[in-house]
Image: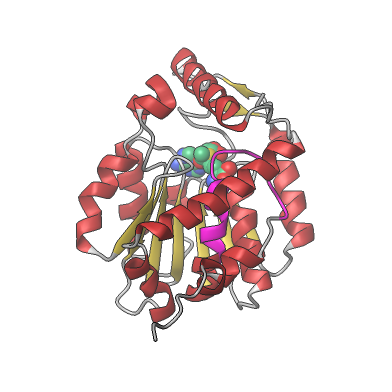
């Protein structure tokens, strides 16, 4: 008799179980179910996010750490000054997310208001288990972030790259400034990896020699197309939840020196988000 195949809910219980507490923007949230599953399996003692903005991905990491009972710290690094893709934004953005994480995740969440290169000096070599790179998305910036932080990764280290699937087709002209795809293609052959196409793409690189087996087995699982389909469906459910909430996005100004280009890129991303999310009303 054939052994029955376990359902995805049984195989990926954390992705199925956790429901996000904070959804503030549409661009990353489709990866929250995978982030829960990965964190529960890897049990990172230290998570660093480069690019926290209004906190959707950062809060998801904190929630996973808390609910999985992991003794881990999450650091969200950002200048909250904007970049060439996002333009500038109001100080209220930082005040809101810092108020939220300090109240909700004391002892788990720390925000670091510094340039990524400066912040890298505050972390001991070999101390970071999970690094999320989601700052400026040019090839040069992503390459710099990866190489600057690489020595800080532990032997259990995993790196997440958001926006590996930003194309002219799904993002218009703004995509021309994005180099995450090119950088991920360059490094992925060196390490076990997996990748999602939905929600503008997420590349996952398992760089450490001693990544826990429960996390590493996701690389094998991802070879089955049903894996990506399942996480894309779970991600789409989060996007629908966000849509139903009608969250207004913060207003962005032009980034000094690159004004019209940045404003056009932000406008384009908002139009795409509106198209994907129906009436989610990105500002
Ligand atoms: C795409 S947003 C991050 C989105 C966020 N992960 C989320 O889930 O909504 C990128 C952020 O990176 C920040 N940033 C870009 N380059 C930076 C740098 N070199 N140092 C510090 N912050 C930077 C910007 O201020 C912006 O808030």
Q: Does residue 151 lie above or below 164 as drawn?
A: below
Q: Residue at x 32, y 69 (%)?
A: 220
Image quarter where the N terminus lies is bottom left
Where on the picture, by quarter, is residue 214?
bottom left
Residue 219: percent from left, percent from top: 34, 67
Residue 283: percent from left, percent from top: 67, 24
Which residue extends farthest top? Answer: 260
Q: Does residue 15 lie above or below 164 as drawn?
A: below
Residue 108: percent from left, percent from top: 66, 67
Q: Does residue 149 lie above or below 40 as drawn?
A: above
Task: Report whether 148 appears left or right of 5.
Answer: left
Decide which of 250, 124 is in the foreground and name it: 250
Residue 204: percent from left, percent from top: 37, 58
Residue span colored magenta: 21-36
Q: Residue at x 37, y 49 (%)?
A: 145
Decide which of 179, 253 is in the foreground and name it: 179
Where on the picture, by quarter, is residue 104?
bottom right
- Residue 17 seen: yes
Q: Is residue 35 magenta?
A: yes
Which residue extends farthest front? Answer: 1
- Here the colouring is secondary structure
Task: Report whether 233 appears left or right of 138.
Answer: right
Q: Does residue 188 lie above or below 270 as drawn?
A: below
């Amino acid at each position: 008799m054939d052994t029955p195949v376990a359902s995805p809910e049984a195989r990926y219980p954390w992705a199925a179980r956790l429901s996000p507490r904070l959804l503030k923007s549409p661009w990353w949230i489709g990866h929250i179910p995978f982030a829960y599953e990965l964190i529960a399996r890897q049990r990172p003692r230290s998570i660093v996010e480069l690019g926290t903005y209004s906190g959707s991905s950062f809060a998801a990491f904190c929630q996973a750490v808390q609910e999985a009972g992991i003794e881990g710290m999450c650091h969200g690094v950002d200048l909250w000054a904007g970049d060439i893709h996002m333009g500038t934004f109001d100080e209220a953005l930082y005040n809101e997310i810092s108020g939220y994480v300090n109240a909700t995740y004391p002892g788990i969440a720390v925000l670091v208001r510094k340039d990524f290169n400066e912040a890298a000096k505050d972390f001991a070599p070999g101390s970071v288990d999970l690094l999320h790179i989601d700052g400026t998305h040019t090839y040069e910036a992503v390459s710099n972030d990866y190489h600057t932080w690489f020595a800080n990764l532990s032997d259990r280290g995993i790196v997440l790259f958001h926006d590996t699937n930003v194309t002219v087709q799904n993002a218009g002209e703004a995509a021309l400034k994005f180099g995450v795809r090119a950088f991920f293609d360059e490094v992925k052959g060196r390490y076990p990896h997996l990748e999602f196409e939905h929600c503008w793409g997420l590349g996952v690189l398992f760089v450490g020699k001693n990544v826990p087996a429960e996390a590493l087995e996701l690389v094998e699982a991802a070879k089955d197309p049903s894996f990506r389909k399942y996480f894309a469906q779970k991600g789409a459910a989060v996007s629908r939840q966000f849509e139903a909430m009608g969250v207004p996005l913060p207003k962005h100004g032009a980034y000094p020196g690159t004004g019209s280009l940045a404003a056009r890129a932000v406008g384009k991303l908002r139009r795409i988000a509106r198209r994907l999310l129906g009436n989610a009303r990105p500002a």
